[in-house]
Image (cartoon, rainbow, N blue to C red):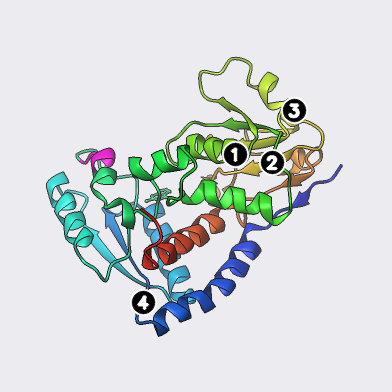
Amino acid sequence: MSAEIINGKDLAQEIRTNMKAEVNELINEGITPHLTVVLVGDNPASKSYVRGKEKAAKEVGISSSLIELPSTASEAELLDVIQKLNGEPSVHGILVQLPLPNQISEQKVIETIDPSKDVDGFHPVNIGRMMIGEDSFLPCTPYGIITMLKSRDIKIEGKHAVIIGRSNIVGKPVGQLLLNENATVTYCHSRTKDLKEHTLQADILIAAIGKADAITSDYVKEGAVVIDVGINRLENGSLTGDVDFDSASKKASYITPVPKGVGPMTIAMLLKNTVKAAKGLAV
Ligand code: GUN
């Protein structure tokens, strides 16, 4: 079998195009959705992600601003910036780009963001609401993955989804969203014994490990749907996922590429969450 490719770049473009009318309607009502991004330090990958988010926001008519703090900024300084943004009515969404320098607690920062402006969906209030199936801001990468599956009418209910990775940003929440869609979910991680034994049972396999090309066809069941969340930069500068695309696509029924896969979907979902925040729909 040769897998069908789910192109996240094209799907994200379609979503952004459809979003423009919704944003225009809001603007006509006097509400311009506004996203404020906070960037601490000068991590080149973070800078590049932030630029991508600002560009995508602009394209759909969402206004955005960037607050940059030096890598030496204290936790108190950052919390103060967030509290001011929480109190600013024209700011609908707040995103603090991760990772943060060691002197700052990421969890403290996440918990300081007003849950109704938490367009990343990382605040425990939003995570908790997602767990019990209530309306909330969904974490953008998991939300993007579910949207990719639904875009191809891939059945989730009753399927066995195996997640490799248990981060708070991707692994844990994507498993929860799949469970909410009535999948049977298995989480694998660095301490899992005999990874293959689990992945070979997956109807839907999600790789979020951060290890280039680690998942070869040996790990993939014939006909499985393979979602690659990895973004790994090789020494030659090119990007590759956690899945060995050429080998895995010989067995998968659907597969997402890297680049042009999950990455652009994450940004599209951030924009969706920002519009939702501007409409005052969540929490
Ligand atoms: N760093 C890597 N991915 C993300 C994300 O989705 N949101 C934020 N805030 N930081 C990130």
How far apart are labels 2 and 1 at the CA level? 7 Å
The kind of residue tagged 1 is: Leu
Q: CA distance from mark 1 to mark 3?
A: 24 Å
What is the three-letter code of the residue carrying label 2?
Ile
Above-or-below relation of 73 to 1: below
Earlier sequence position, callout 2 versus callout 3: 2
Disc 2 is placed on an element classified as: loop
Q: Which mark is residue 156?
A: 2
Q: Would residue 10 be found to the left or right of residue 136 on screen?
A: right
Q: Are marks 2 and 1 in contact (CB under 8 Å)?
A: yes
Question: Can the viewer see residue 236 in this picture?
Answer: yes
Name the secondary structure under disc 4.
Answer: loop
Quadrant of the frame with the N terminus: top right
Q: Which residue is mark 3?
A: 218
Q: Amino acid at mark 3?
A: Asp
- Is residue 106 in the magenta section? yes
Q: Residue 46: horizontal and vertical position, in percent?
A: 38, 54
Helix, strand or loop status at disc 3: helix
Q: Amino acid at mark 4?
A: Thr
Q: Residue at x 16, y 45 (%)?
A: 75
Q: Which residue is mark 4?
A: 32
Task: Give yes or no for contact between labels 4 and 3 (Cβ–Cβ under 8 Å).
Answer: no
Q: Position of residue 219 (x, y in %)?
A: 71, 28
Q: Nearer the viewer, residue 267 or 176?
A: 176
State whether residue 94 is above or below residue 241.
Answer: below
Which residue in the protein does label 1 denote? Answer: 178
Residues shaded magenta: 104-108
